[in-house]
Every structure is written in structure tokens, then in C-alpha cells.
Image (cartoon, rainbow, N blue to C red):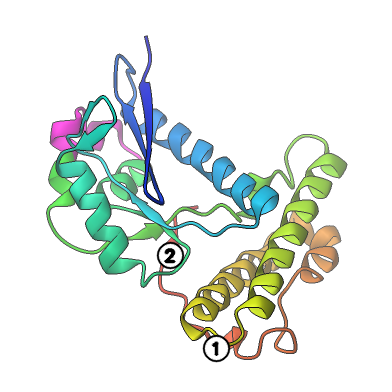
Amino acid sequence: MGSVINGIVFSDSFVRVVTKGDAPNLQQLALSELIHLENIQRQVVQKFGLLVRGAITIGQVFVESNIVFGPALVRAVELEERYTHRMPVILLDHNIDTLIKTKERKDVPKTWEESSRFTQDGAPTSILNHSNILSLGLGWGNRDEGKKRTIDFLTAQRSTILRGTEQYTEVPDILDKYKWFACYHNSEIRKGKRLKHFQTEYKELCEQLITEDEMPGVNSVEFHFQTWN
């Protein structure tokens, strides 16, 4: 048996709980979950044009009927409320970030209880990077298929940002979210410039950038968090 997944919806929130089960490799399980969540976030943007925010952590959590409670949920809510600045970002707590970046197996936490010690102090360190060009598929498998998948997604994300910008021009709090999102969108595309095997595709990627003419001040928005990949 592998991990067990539970999902509960309440109000405007969705809680996803993945238990370790008999999964032998906690690091691999965490990476698999992050990749899955990236795909979900892409679909939400591409199909529905919605922005989401939240936090991911490791720790004790209990699921009974339609109720979720426990230290891990409290920590995730705290992170979302305190550190997202209400921007459309999914944060990774220290325990997740430490886990996925650990190279030596001996340093990987072996149990949820051991890894939960990372949740005690400090701000989160990374954001879930759903716009990462590598994970979108450009450069993997069939180059033409990967290129089309990448360009199609970035085009859809760009359209979502520009529609939101136009719709909420007179609502500063919401407009700030779209400005942050545009800055994040542009920053991931610009990373392609440093990847030599993407040079032939780079011109088309640059066409997906949000410009100052389309969103004044987009290049001056502070980018608050590092991405995990």
C-alpha cells in the first residue's frame, strides 16, 4: 500500500491530506505530491482562470467525516494568513523545503513526527512553482509537443492575468494580486534565457511576457518568495 489521500471542501477552502501509509521514501512521496499539485494549479488557471493561495506543511493531522483538525492544519492556515500577503501563491513550509532539497538520505526525516519539528519557527521558504518551464514539458520527450504545451499554458495564464487586470482596475487590493502574478509569470519566462537548449524557443516565450504597456508597474513589483524548482 502507498499513501492515502483525503480531500475536504468547506467554505471557499479545500484541504488535501496525504498520509505516509507504507510509502518507503518520504522524499519521493513529497516530490510526487508537489508535482501533482502543480498540475492541479495549472488546470485551475488554464480551465477556470482562477487564482489560488494556500500553504503546504508536514505534521500531525486528523480526518474524521468532513472535519479536519490538528497541528499541521493550524500551521498551514497560519502560513497562508501571515505570509502570503494575500497573493495567489502556495507556500512550502520549512519541513517540505528541507525535505525536497536534502541530498543525503541519512538527513531525510524518516517519520512525520520527526519532520514536524521543522514547523516550529520561521517563515516559509519557497512557493509551489506551477509556471516552471522545465516542468511544463519544454525540453522533455518530443520537443514540438513540449513546446506547444508550454506556450499554450503560458498564453492561457497571460490571458487570465490581463482579464483580471482589466476587470479589477478600480479595486487596488485585487489588482495587486494580478500584478504579483504577472511578475511571477514574467520571472519564470525570463529564466529560459539562461537555458541554452531553450534558445530556439526563447523568442516565442518572450512573446508571453506581460509588458509595462499592458500592466504599468509590473516590472517594479516585489517578488516575495523563492520558487522550489
Q: Position of residue 10 (x, y in %)?
A: 35, 43
Q: Position of residue 64 (x, y in %)?
A: 22, 25
Is 42 situated left or right of 211 in this image? left
Quadrant of the rendered image containing residue 103? top left
Q: Residue at x 24, y 35 (%)?
A: 68
Is 214 situated left or right of 31 in this image? right
Which of discs 2 and 1 lies nearer the camera? The answer is 1
**SS of the residue under disc 1:** helix
Mark carried by residue 226: 2
Mark carried by residue 220: 1
Residue type at mark 2?
Gln
Q: Tell me the magenta residue range.
A: 103-115
Is 220 situated left or right of 165 in this image? left
Between 45 and 151, the one lying in front of the other is 45
Between 201 and 92, the one lying in front of the other is 92
Residue type at mark 1?
Ser
Q: Position of residue 71 (x, y in %)?
A: 14, 43
Lower position in the chain sequence, tag 2 or tag 1:
1
Q: CA distance from mark 2 to mark 1?
A: 17 Å
**SS of the residue under disc 2:** strand
